[in-house]
Image (spheres, rainbow, N blue to C red):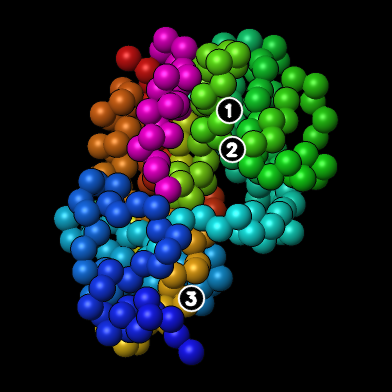
C-alpha cells in the first residue's frame, strides 16, 4: 500500500521528497531538481548503517544530500544508545589538541564552545590543555549529561540545540569554537556557520571537521546511479543520519567566505579515524 505521493515518486515524475522536507536547495544554492532521476546508491556494507543508502547528487557542485532533507528526532535516541568514550575517541581528542596548538596560539583562559559535544571527550581534553579555560559543551540530547565523560568543573554541559545556544543574548563570545561531526547533520549548515562567526570574539577560531563527498570515492565504483524504480523509497526518504556530504572545495568556499582559513587538511582526521574522508578546517575571524 503506497500513498499517492509515493506512487508519484515511484514513477519518477515528481521530486522524491516526502512531507517532512524543509529545504529544496543544495548547500551550493542550486535548487534540487528531478530528484528521483539523480539518485546514487552507496553500497559499502560498513557505511550502510550510518549513512543514507541513497543520496541525491548535485549536478552543479557534486555534493551529496539526503533524499529527504530533515532530521527525525528519534535519530537522537539511536545515537544515544551507542555513546561511549573508547580509546579511539581519547586518542582523537588528544591529537586534535596537539594539531590545534601547532597551528594557532590559544590562550590558557580561552572561552571555548564545543557544539555537538556528544559525551564530551574533546571538551574535557580542551579543558585540560588550557588550564584556565571555560568550555561550554552544547549537546541536543539532555540525557547525554548523565553519560558525560569526565567531571571537570570548567566544562559546562549545555543541553539544547546549537542554534538556540548561539542565539542566546547572555552567552559569552568564544575564542575557539569546535564543530566536529556536526555540519553533515544540519539542514542549514550555512546559517549555523553565520551564527558561529557572530559568536566568535575578534580573531576567534573555528575548528571544524566533517566527512566529505570524497568518502565515497574510496568505495569506487560506488556510489552508482540507480533508476527510480530500483530505489527503496521509504528507506531513502527516512534515513537522514547524514543530510549533506559536501564536496571539499565547496566546504572551503563556505568557510573562506566567512573566515580566514588558517589551516585545511583532509588527511589529519581521516588517517586517525579511517571510516570516512574528513575535511578539517581551522578558520579565524577577520
Ligand atoms: Zn550543489
How far apart marks 1 and 3 lie (CA) works out to 32 Å
Of mark 1 and mark 3, the one earlier in the sequence is 1
* Residue at which label 1 appears: 165
Q: Where is residue 192 shown, x and y percent of the image?
A: 43, 34
* Residue at which label 3 appears: 235
Q: Nearer the viewer, residue 175 or 108?
A: 175
* Residue at which label 2 appears: 161
The stretch drawn in magenta includes residue 165? no
Q: Quadrant of residue 33?
A: bottom left
242 over 238 or under it: above or below = above
The reply to whether discs 1 and 2 touch (Cβ–Cβ < 8 Å) is: yes
How far apart marks 1 and 2 lie (CA) works out to 7 Å
Q: Quadrant of residue 202?
A: top left
- The mark found on residue 35 in the picture is none
Q: Where is residue 44 shown, x and y percent of the image?
A: 45, 75
4 over 22 or under it: above or below = below
Residue at the left extreme, as displayed: 60
**Circle 1 crowding by C-alpha within 10 Å: few under 14, some 14–19, many from 20:** many
Task: Confirm whether residue 149 shows in the render.
Answer: no
The stretch drawn in magenta includes residue 189? yes
Left/right placement of residue 230 relative to residue 270 reads left
Picture residue at 73% right of the left edge, 48% below the top? 85
Q: Where is residue 198 shown, x and y percent of the image?
A: 42, 19
Q: Assign a secondary structure to mark 3.
A: helix
Of mark 3 and mark 2, the one earlier in the sequence is 2
Question: What stretch of residues is rendered in magenta?
Answer: 187-206
Amino acid at each position: 500500500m503506497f500513498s499517492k505521493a509515493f506512487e508519484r515518486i515511484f514513477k519518477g515524475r515528481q521530486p522524491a521528497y516526502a512531507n517532512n522536507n524543509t529545504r529544496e536547495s543544495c548547500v551550493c544554492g542550486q535548487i534540487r531538481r528531478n530528484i528521483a532521476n539523480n539518485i546514487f546508491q552507496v553500497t559499502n556494507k560498513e557505511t550502510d548503517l550510518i549513512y543514507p543508502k541513497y543520496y541525491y547528487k548535485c549536478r552543479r557542485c557534486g555534493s551529496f544530500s539526503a533524499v529527504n532533507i530533515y532530521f527525525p528526532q528519534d535519530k537522537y535516541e539511536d545515537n544515544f544508545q551507542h555513546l561511549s568514550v573508547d580509546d579511539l575517541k581519547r586518542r582523537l581528542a588528544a591529537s586534535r589538541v596537539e594539531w590545534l596548538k601547532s597551528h594557532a596560539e590559544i590562550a590558557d583562559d580561552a572561552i571555548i564552545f564545543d557544539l555537538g559535544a556528544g559525551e564530551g571527550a574533546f571538551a574535557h581534553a580542551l579543558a585540560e590543555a588550557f588550564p584556565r579555560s571555560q568550555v561550554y559543551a552544547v549537546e541536543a540530547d539532555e540525557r547525554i549529561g548523565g553519560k558525560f565523560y569526565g567531571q571537570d568543573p570548567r566544562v559546562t554541559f549545555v543541553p539544547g540545540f546549537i542554534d538556540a545556544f548561539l542565539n542566546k543574548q547572555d552567552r559569552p563570545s568564544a575564542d575557539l569554537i569546535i564543530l566536529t561531526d556536526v555540519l553533515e547533520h544540519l539542514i542549514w549548515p550555512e546559517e549555523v556557520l553565520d551564527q558561529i562567526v557572530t559568536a566568535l570574539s575578534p580573531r576567534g577560531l573555528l575548528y571544524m571537521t566533517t566527512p566529505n563527498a570524497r568518502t565515497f570515492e574510496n568505495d569506487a565504483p560506488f556510489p552508482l546511479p540507480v533508476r527510480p524504480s530500483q530505489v527503496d523509497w521509504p528507506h531513502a526518504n527516512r534515513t537522514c543520519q547524514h543530510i549533506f556530504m559536501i564536496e571539499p572545495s565547496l566546504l572551503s568556499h563556505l568557510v573562506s567566505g566567512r573566515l580566514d582559513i588558517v589551516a585545511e587538511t583532509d588527511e589529519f582526521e581521516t588517517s586517525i579515524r579511517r571510516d570516512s574522508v574528513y575535511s578539517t578546517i581551522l578558520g579565524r575571524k577577520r
